[in-house]
Structure formats: structure tokens, C-alpha cells
């Protein structure tokens, strides 16, 4: 069929509508009819009652180059569509291609239409003399590195694609060669070097690939003479085990001014003028992505393409999207790993593959690739093993010891674990590992951080076990992260609090790994680490997670006669505080009451004051307000006598909250005011943030809204800076109380909804006592809004942090901040 349109946009609209209709039509037997289409824009020459001429001929050749279901466009048509495409339609460039009977290459593109297939083999164009590239059996999932590589080769004479095994460097090099082939007078030569056993044979292998005639001279001489007057792209694939042949590469660049070299290697060649292009894993779907976003990620598109080759009926659906997303995430988006896993779809469901990855890891799950692949590429383990065996023994030792780190580490911790101490930092070995693409280096807060892809870390862990080094290296890892936690602990209440909280956040996975190892092998170390991290869990970490670790630690320590009783007491008290914050108030109160009996007999007033303070808070949360008041009164008296300002501020705050429960507003204002004065003197950011909320709510209860607004403004800013979601929820609840008192009912409901969402994140539920206080202030506002209250509350629960802060700022600015 041949159709003519007055505009390129009209032709696109017709093609899209036709392809959609063809896909949706119920063809007999459930088969699909796939139709190829091509379009070009040119001058129409009438011949009788039809159009004729070279542009009609070019359009037919473009259509003939397409595959069933594909719509190809000429370069002219593509240019006319810039900025004019309808929603859901995009254009993807495919490079220049030679079409039958046409003297010059045509720059082709394809339409990418939402809901229609987009992965097709390369266009069916004419081979160009001198472009000799392997023809992969599978289709190529487009990657931005192809265009970037082509761009870099416009200026660089040597481009090296680097990355760990399995990232798809070879395929990228082939596609770059395909894209650039027509730009080189003498085409593209591909030299596959994987099977070349020694650097001395590289010249012969490259000469064969370039079509150098045989002769009496050495291969090196013949190759340099052959290339000297060539305008050609030469691809040197898999160079990492032949780095001693790098001088040959330098000689080619010196002898052949119009030759460009594209190398693939797990390590750069380190030649002057070399341009390195690291090849990252494929883009992954983010947790929580919807079905369309999962389908659109590069890693999932590759999985679907290869899975459909194994089982044609396979597709990503709402039922299996979460499993497919988990598969590609657990495989780090490594193309080889994704392809190997997709092949398992022949006998396993996506859920079964995801389950196996969860329990067995990537190396054991993904299995074996196609029989026509090189042996080193048939399993993921073989790919990594190839790189590992190229390492010097010292560097190999550093690599396998890196397996103990979860989520990577910075130089101080790496030095402590991998060397003989912080001064013995194995930087040279790390540099080699980064060059060989076994380790990834990034910058984190201005400092280098080194990580392993999870699949590579599994391999390193196997080698660590095999070398008999696991126990020694794991102990050093646990000791190093205990040292970090101990260094952070005194700084979690001062001016530098946020920086140390951020540092512990970065190492959260390593801290978890250290705790898990210590619980199995050294209970006293686990106890020290759990106690040291307790404030971090309270301020920044999840309270429930902290309670989980401390419960396990306390239970294990109770059975160890060598554990220091004072350390166990500390751990129990911190556990009680975390249980209380996590909403397990009865358990917390029972724990503190049990400790109180023991502490009174011991005669240690400092411990007694701590226990009474914590017991008072738990009793209040259990509904025993008078019992809480008695305990907290005694805690305040003890801490005044002991001269413990930080402890006194805490006890005064808690006693003030009980006074507010009892409607003793004037007393509450005095107690909160004194606590705030002490915390400002101590420069305790967390304490100040809490005190300002409490004092603001007391001022609102006293009817002084203008005093409350600036206090709440300070509290919100401080909790945001601290990254404390539970604390920010508390501050937003204070803002909601102010909104209710100031007549901003909708904002009151929105802010309460936002605080509920934040409490869900932090694992710190609203206590019944705090809920009673809130109800006292907002119940009349809720009654006045009626159904609008419910919708505003829901709006708040689904709002972003920035939106919630905007609502809080509206209320605060309106009422005096």
C-alpha cells in the first residue's frame, strides 16, 4: 500500500493508528499480523494519476528495511517532526544505513509508541563493504552509551569501554561500530581478542581482522603499513588480559592518523589521549514504580526480550511486575546476569526465580548461557572468575576481603579492615580493582567510597571462605564499625550531630552486618555496639529496628556469665526506651519497673534517676498519669542533687508533659521553659527541638498563640535538619494544634495526616496520652469541618514532605512566626 500525506505529522498519526488497530484486531487463531511501514518526505512528481520519482523509490526502500510491526522514518521526516509529536509517541535514532539501489546512506529512525512493540533487530539494510561486525543472534535493547560512544569517537582517537564482566561492553562496541560504519571510508574491523592467549599474538589477530594480506614481514610491521593510509574504525574486543600489548595500540595511533580505535576492557589501557567510557549496568526500576515504569526500564526490557525467546507467551503483567523488578535489581542490572536469569523462564515462573535469588543468591540461580558463547561467558561465575585470576595475589586478597562490607565503605573503615590498621590503607590495590572494574568508586560527601556489585560481592565472599579468612576479617569489620559508632556517640547531642547521624546512615548496612556477626560470635561486642547505637536509632534510625537488635542482644548477653552487669543494665534501659517509642508501652513499663527494684537495692542514684525517668514516661503512655508524676518528681529531685544538666532537662520535659495532661498549664510552661534553657546552654539540637514543641503547645493552652508560632517554626526546622521523621511528626502535630486554635481547620487536618505518614515511616506511633492531648485541642475543629476533615486528613497522609512544610509555614506565618 502507498499513501501520500500533506504533512509528516499526518503520516505519523495514520501509521500509529494503523499499528494500534492491527495489534488490537482479533486475528483468527490468536495469531498476530505484523506489518512493516516506512515514511519519507520529499517532492511529489505526478506521473499520470500517481506519484513517481526517486523519493517514492526511497520510501519503498525504507519500508523494506523495517521489520513487522516497525515504523521507520527517513532523516528528513524525523527533522520535520522535532517538537511536533503527539503524546505517547517518540522517535529513536537508528544511525545511517545503506539501502538497496541508493548511492548514499540514509539516516533511519523508528517510531516508539506507547503500548506497541519497540525492540526490533537492526534494519534490513545493505551490508557496506569493509564493515565486518559480528551478527548477534538476539535483538539489542537500546542504551544511551551507544550514542555517547559515537560522540566521543568524534574527537578521541582511542575510546575504551570499561566495566565489570557481564555489563555488555562487547555488544555496545558492535552497536557503536554499526552506527559509525558509514562515516569511515574503509569501514569497521572487529578484532575479537578473548581467545588470544598471549600479548605476542595480538598483532596477528588484529591484522587478520583488518584483512591484512599475508607476507614475509612480521604481523606488526604488515599491520602498521596496512593501516597507515586507512580511514577506519578498528574494534579491539576483550583487551584486559593482554595489557602488555598496549605498545602496539600506541604504534597504531602513531602510524595511522585517520584510524580510530575502540577497545573493550575491564581496565583502561592507560595511554596518552585515551578516552574512557565506563559502561554501567542497565537502568533499574525503582521500588514502588508502577507497571508502566517497570516495563520501561532497560533491565526489564532486556529480561522480557530474552524471556520471550525462551517462552514466547511471557510478558510483564500487574501480577508478575514486582517479581521481575526484584529479579533485575538483585542482579544489579548486569546484562549477562539478566539474560541468564531470563532463560530460566522456560521452566520457572518469575516468582520462583525471585524466590531463588532471595535465598540462594545470583551466582547460584542464573545458571548457564547459550552453548555458542565463549566458556568464560556461559555462567556469571565464570565471568567474574576470569577477572579474579588476572589479579596479583595481594590485590586478589584485598578483593575477597571486601566481601565483608555491605554497601561499600570509605577509606578509614577500609584501612582498618583490609590492612594492619588505619595507617595501612590499601589504596594501590583498590586503584587496581577499580581499573579492572571489579570495584566501583564514587564520591560521597566529598570522600571516596568503594563498593562491589552484589553479584560480584557473592563471588568475593566465596573466595574469602575458600581462603579461610572469613572469621578474622569479619571480626576486624565488627571492631571497625564499633569504633565508628563509639566515635559518633558523644557527637549525637552537640552542634555536629547531623554530620555524625549522616555518617551512621551511610554505614547502616555495615552496622547491621557487624551486629549480626557479633551476636553469633562475640556477645560482649554486640552489647557494646547495640548500646552505642541506641541514640542513633532513637533520633534517626527506625525505633523498631533498634528494639529488634537490642532484644536479641540482651537475650544473648543474659546467658553469658562474662558480660559486665553495668553494660547489661545500660542495654536493658535503652531497650525499654526503644520499646516505648515503638509503641510497646506495657512491655517498656514492665521492664523499667523490674529494673527499679534492683537499682534501689544497689544504691546508685544516677542509675535510679535514669530508671525513674524512663519509667515515668512509660507509665504515662500506659495511662497511669499519677504514677508517672510520682516517678518523674523523684527523677527531677535526684538529677538536681547529682548536678546532671542533660538528665535534668529530660526529666523536666517529661514532668512538664504530665503537668499538661493534668491541665496544670502554668506549671507545664515553667518546666518546659527550664528544660529549654538547659538544652540551649548544652547546645543539644534534639533536646531543643523537643522542648520548643512542648513549650509551644503549653503556650497555646494558655491562649498565647504569638509566643507559640516562632517556637514551632524553630522546632520544624531543627527536626528537618536532624532527619528525624518521628520528631518532625511531633512538631507538625504542634502546628496542627496551633492551626486549630487559630481557625485554620483544613490545614489542621492536613498537618495531622502528614504526621501520621511520618510516624509510619519512623515506626513511632502516637501514644494514647498524646492522642488525648491532641483531641482536646482539635476535636471541635474536626466537628466543625464535617466530611471536609476526612478528605483533608487523607490529603495530608499522601502529601510530600515539602508540601507538609509549606502548609506548616502558612499557619506559622499567619499566626506570628
Image (tube, rainbow, N blue to C red):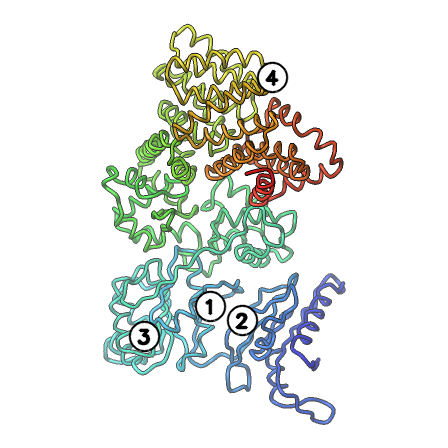
Name the residue nearer the viewer: 812 or 495.
812
Q: Residue at label 2?
A: 93
Residue 17, image x, y percentages: 71, 69
Rendered residue at 66%/26% (across/down): 775
Q: Quadrant of residue 734?
A: top right
N-terminal label among 3 and 4: 3
Residue 480, image x, y percentages: 32, 34
Q: Residue at label 4?
A: 662
Q: CA distance from mark 2 to mark 4?
A: 72 Å
Q: CA distance from mark 1 to mark 3?
A: 28 Å
Tally of marks: 4
Residue 32, image x, y percentages: 70, 65
Disc 4 element = loop
Q: Quadrant of residue 300?
A: bottom right
N-terminal label among 4 and 1: 1
Q: Nearer the viewer, mark 1 or mark 3?
A: 1
Q: CA distance from mark 1 to mark 2?
A: 9 Å
Crowding around mark 3 (Cα neighbors within 10 Å: few <14, some 14 to 19, many 20+) is many
**Contact check, label 4 and label 1, Cβ < 8 Å:** no
Seen in the picture, residue 46 relative to 647 is either above or below; the reply is below
Q: Residue at label 3?
A: 207
Disc 2 element = strand
The quarter of the rendered structure image containing the C terminus is: top right
Disc 1 element = helix
**Contact check, label 1 and label 2, Cβ < 8 Å:** yes
N-terminal label among 1 and 2: 2
Mark yes or no: residue 348 visible.
no
Q: Residue at label 1?
A: 147
**Contact check, label 3 and label 2, Cβ < 8 Å:** no
The quarter of the rendered structure image containing the N terminus is: bottom right
Amino acid at each position: 500500500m502507498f499513501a501520500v500525506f500533506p504533512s509528516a505529522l499526518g503520516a505519523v498519526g495514520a501509521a500509529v493508528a494503523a499499528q494500534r488497530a492491527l495489534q488490537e484486531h482479533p486475528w483468527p487463531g490468536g495469531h498476530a499480523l505484523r506489518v512493516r511501514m516506512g515514511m519519507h518526505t520529499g517532492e511529489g512528481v505526478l506521473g499520470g494519476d500517481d506519484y513517481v520519482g526517486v523519493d517514492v523509490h526511497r520510501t519503498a526502500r525504507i519500508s523494506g528495511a523495517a521489520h513487522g510491526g516497525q515504523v521507520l522514518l527517513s532523516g528528513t521526516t524525523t527533522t520535520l517532526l522535532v517538537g511536533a509529536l503527539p503524546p505517547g509517541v517518540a522517535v529513536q535514532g537508528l544511525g545511517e544505513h545503506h539501502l538497496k539501489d541508493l548511492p548514499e546512506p540514509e539516516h533511519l529512525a523508528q517510531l516508539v509508541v506507547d503500548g506497541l512493540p519497540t525492540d526490533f533487530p537492526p534494519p534490513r539494510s545493505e551490508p557496506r563493504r569493509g564493515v565486518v561486525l559480528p551478527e548477534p543472534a538476539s535483538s539489542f535493547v537500546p542504551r544511551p552509551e551507544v550514542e555517547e560512544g559515537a560522540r566521543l569517537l568524534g574527537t578521541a582517537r582511542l575510546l575504551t569501554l570499561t566495566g565489570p564482566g557481564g555489563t555488555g561492553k562487547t555488544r555496545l562496541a558492535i552497536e557503536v561500530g554499526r552506527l559509525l560504519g558509514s562515516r569511515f571510508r574503509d569501514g569497521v574491523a572487529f578484532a575479537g581478542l578473548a581467545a588470544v592467549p598471549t600479548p605476542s599474538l595480538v598483532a596477528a589477530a588484529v591484522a587478520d581482522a583488518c584483512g591484512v594480506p599475508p607476507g614475509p614481514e612480521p604481523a606488526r610491521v604488515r599491520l602498521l603499513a596496512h593501516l597507515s593510509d586507512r580511514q577506519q574504525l578498528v574494534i579491539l574486543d576483550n583487551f584486559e588480559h593482554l595489557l602488555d600489548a598496549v605498545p602496539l595500540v600506541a604504534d597504531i595511533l602513531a602510524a595511522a592518523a585517520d584510524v580510530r580505535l575502540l577497545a573493550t576492557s575491564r581496565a583502561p589501557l592507560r595511554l596518552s589521549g585515551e578516552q574512557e567510557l565506563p559502561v554501567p549496568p542497565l537502568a533499574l526500576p525503582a521500588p514502588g514504580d508502577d507497571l508502566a515504569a517497570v516495563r520501561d526500564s532497560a533491565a526489564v526490557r532486556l529480561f522480557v526480550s530474552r524471556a520471550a525467546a525462551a517462552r514466547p507467551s511471557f510478558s510483564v503483567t500487574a501480577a508478575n511486575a514486582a517479581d521481575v523488578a526484584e529479579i533485575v535489581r538483585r542482579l544489579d542490572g548486569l546484562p549477562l546476569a539478566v539474560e541468564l536469569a531470563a532463560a530460566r523462564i522456560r521452566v520457572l515462573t518469575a516468582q520462583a526465580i525471585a524466590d531463588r535469588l532471595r535465598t540462594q543468591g545470583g551466582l547460584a540461580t542464573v545458571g548457564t548461557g547459550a552453548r555458542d558463547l565463549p566458556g568464560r561467558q556461559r555462567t556469571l561465575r565464570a565471568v567474574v572468575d576470569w577477572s579474579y585470576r588476572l589479579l596479583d595475589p595481594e590485590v586478589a586478597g584485598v578483593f575477597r576481603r571486601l566481601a565483608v562490607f555491605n554497601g561499600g565503605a570509605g577509606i578509614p573503615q577500609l584501612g582498618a579492615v583490609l590492612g594492619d590498621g588505619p595507617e595501612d590503607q590499601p589504596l594501590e590495590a583498590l586503584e587496581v580493582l577499580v581499573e579492572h572494574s571489579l570495584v566501583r568508586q564514587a564520591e560521597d560527601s566529598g570522600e571516596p567510597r568503594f563498593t562491589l556489585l552484589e553479584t560480584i560481592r557473592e563471588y568475593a565472599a566465596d573466595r574469602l571462605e575458600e581462603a579461610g579468612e572469613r572469621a578474622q576479617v569479619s571480626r576486624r569489620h565488627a571492631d571497625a564499625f564499633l569504633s565508628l559508632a563509639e566515635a559518633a556517640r558523644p557527637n549525637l547531642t552537640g552542634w555536629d550531630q547531623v554530620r555524625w547521624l549522616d555518617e551512621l546512615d551511610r554505614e547502616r548496612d555495615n552496622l547491621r552486618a557487624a551486629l549480626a556477626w557479633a551476636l553469633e560470635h562475640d556477645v560482649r561486642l554486640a552489647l557494646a555496639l547495640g548500646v552505642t547505637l541506641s541514640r542513633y536509632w532513637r533520633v534517626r534510625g527506625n525505633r523498631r529496628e533498634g528494639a529488634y537488635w537490642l532484644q536479641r542482644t540482651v537475650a544473648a548477653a543474659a546467658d553469658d556469665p562474662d558480660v559486665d552487669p553495668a553494660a547489661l543494665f545500660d542495654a536493658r534501659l535503652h531497650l525499654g526506651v526503644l520499646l516505648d517509642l515503638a509503641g510497646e508501652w506495657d512491655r517498656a513499663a514492665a521492664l523499667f519497673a523490674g529494673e527499679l527494684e534492683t537499682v534501689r537495692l544497689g544504691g546508685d542514684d544516677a542509675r535510679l534517676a535514669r530508671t525513674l525517668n524512663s519509667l515515668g514516661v512509660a507509665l504515662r503512655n500506659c495511662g497511669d498519669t499519677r504514677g508517672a508524676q510520682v516517678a518523674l518528681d523523684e527523677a527531677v529531685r535526684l538529677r538536681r542533687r547529682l548536678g546532671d544538666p542533660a538528665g535534668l532537662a529530660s526529666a523536666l520535659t517529661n514532668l512538664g508533659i504530665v503537668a499538661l495532661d493534668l491541665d496544670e498549664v502554668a506549671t507545664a510552661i515553667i518546666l518546659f521553659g527550664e528544660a529549654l534553657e538547659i538544652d540551649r546552654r548544652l547546645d543539644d539540637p534534639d533536646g531543643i527541638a523537643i522542648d520548643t514543641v512542648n513549650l509551644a503547645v503549653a503556650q497555646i493552652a494558655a491562649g498565647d498563640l504569638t509566643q507559640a508560632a516562632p517556637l514551632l517554626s524553630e522546632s520544624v526546622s531543627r527536626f528537618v535538619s536532624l532527619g528525624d521523621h518521628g520528631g518532625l511528626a511531633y512538631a507538625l502535630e504542634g502546628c496542627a494544634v496551633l492551626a486549630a486554635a487559630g481557625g485554620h481547620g483544613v490545614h489542621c487536618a492536613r498537618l495531622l495526616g502528614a504526621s501520621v505518614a511520618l510516624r509510619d515511616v519512623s515506626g513511632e506511633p502516637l501514644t494514647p496520652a498524646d492522642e488525648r492531648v491532641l483531641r482536646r485541642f482539635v476535636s471541635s475543629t474536626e466537628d466543625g469541618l464535617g466530611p471536609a476533615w476526612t478528605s483533608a486528613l487523607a490529603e495530608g497522609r499522601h502529601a510530600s514532605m515539602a508540601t507538609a512544610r509549606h502548609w506548616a509555614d502558612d499557619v506559622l506565618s499567619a499566626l506570628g512566626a
